Image (cartoon, rainbow, N blue to C red):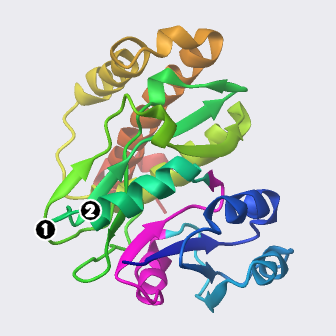
Amino acid sequence: MKISVVINTYNSEIYLRRVLESVKGFDEIVICDMHSTDKTISIAEEYSCKIVYHERYAYVEPARQFAIQSASYEWILVVDSDEIVPEILRHYLYEKIGKKNPPEALWIPRKNYFMGHFLHGDYPDYILRFFKKEGAFWSSHIHVPVKIEGKEESIPAKRKDLAFIHLANNSVHSKLHKINTYSDYEVGKRKDQNFPYFKILYAPTFRFIKSYFIKRGIWDGKAGLINAAMDAFYKFVTIAKIWESRISPDDIDPELRN
């Protein structure tokens, strides 16, 4: 059985060569590009990738379905343009689909880094990135995983050697930018959900406790503490923006009305 690797790109030259080196042993590499203006395409051409183009969006999900449908083979491995696929994971995937009655999809752990440190508090950060092409559907909503038909399994978290390596070493500045950007999209996705007054207090608190204590971010020193606090802040900002989006004209102070 053959596997197509699918990579969505936009101005991805910084890590792309390392990523392509890690996946060159697969049967096909599909680059779905949003009209990059840097060296992304020339790097992809060096590796004889199949290159298709998609309209530019601020985030990747609207192009996911088009990208996977552009692949030639039955099995799909979706890789971001800043993720390394360990060679041992490649062997594991081929062995998995070579067995009788393999699952239709596989959740893969991922190693994330912040302020130069591996984040225990973010691990295993499971992502559904390996699946059968037939019956797969990827929503255009941000942070929504692919939906598949059939059985799903997860690679055991203890197998860190099989985890994706997320090369992006996030800074505080970049995480703040992502918080602001992603929380904007959360407003539309969660518009029908209920967010009572007290949720803005307990939801961020629980998120901090989960990241820092339950998921062992406390092991990561200052980086773990800051990461847990920013996880909590993301939840706080998301709920605050949802509340703001629901303000009616009658709620606005009369001095601000036209």
Q: Residue 228 or 149: which is nearer the viewer?
A: 149
The front one of 48 and 113 is 48
| Residue 126 place in picture, x, y as percent | 37, 44
Task: Tell me if 256 is positioned left or right of 24 in this view.
Answer: left
Magenta span contains residue 78: yes
Identify the disc placed on residue 249.
none
Q: Distance between the residues labelled 2 and 1?
A: 8 Å
- 135 is higher (above) or lower (below) than 153: below
| Rendered-image quadrant of the N terminus | bottom left
Disc 1 residue type (three-letter): Gly
**Few, some or many residues within 10 Å of mark 1 (<14, 14–19, 20+):** few
Side of 4 where 140 appears, left or right = left
Q: Which segment did they paint magenta?
A: 61-83
Identify the residue at horizontal 41%, vertical 22% (top origin).
211
Magenta span includes 132: no
Q: Where is residue 96 in the image (x, y as percent from the top left)?
A: 31, 58
Q: Against 221, is 9 above or below?
A: below
Q: What element carries label 2?
A: strand
